[in-house]
Image (cartoon, rainbow, N blue to C red):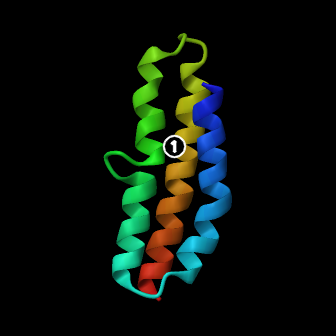
Amino acid sequence: MIKYIEQLELAEKEAPGRIDRAVAIEELEALRLQYLGRKGVVTMALQGLGGLAPEERPVLGKRANETKTTLTALIDRRAAE
């Protein structure tokens, strides 16, 4: 579980700067896929829920959903600009 949380924290730290520096919609789409796509950081964390103890699942699930919400909002905001 710690590995997934560390990956989510890293994504939350690095993503805002990368999203702000994106100048083309293609760059934003690549970032969306990197973080939120089928093999993205958030998706992999959510897929890892099944291998965790029942008491750990809510913690990781909540963290992953918060990260997903944050990154989606950042990408959507930047795309609107």
Quadrant in which residue 19 is drawn: bottom right
Is 69 placed above or below 31 here?
above
Circle 1 crowding by C-alpha within 10 Å: few under 14, some 14–19, many from 20: some
**In the shown orientation, is residue 29 left or right of residue 18?**
left
Residue placed at 36% from the left, 59% from the top?
Answer: 33
Is 10 placed above or below 30 here?
above
Report x, y in % for residue 29: 35, 70
Q: Which of the two residues, 81 or 38, is positioned nearer the viewer here?
A: 38
Report x, y in % for residue 50: 42, 18
Residue placed at 35% from the left, 45% from the top?
Answer: 39
Is 79 placed above or below 75 here?
below
**In the shown orientation, is residue 43 left or right of residue 19?**
left
In the image, what residue type sits under mark 1? Asn
Quadrant in which residue 47 is drawn: top left
Dot 1 lies on which element? helix
Q: Which quarter of the image is occupied by the N terminus?
A: top right
Residue placed at 42% from the left, 57% from the top?
Answer: 34
Q: Which residue position holds label 1?
A: 65
Is 36 placed above or below 73 here?
above
Residue placed at 49% from the left, 81% from the top?
Answer: 22
Report x, y in % for residue 28: 41, 74
**In the shown orientation, is residue 32 left or right of residue 77?**
left
Report x, y in % for residue 64: 53, 40
Q: What count of labels does the image hold? A: 1
**In the shown orientation, is residue 9 left or right of residue 72?**
right
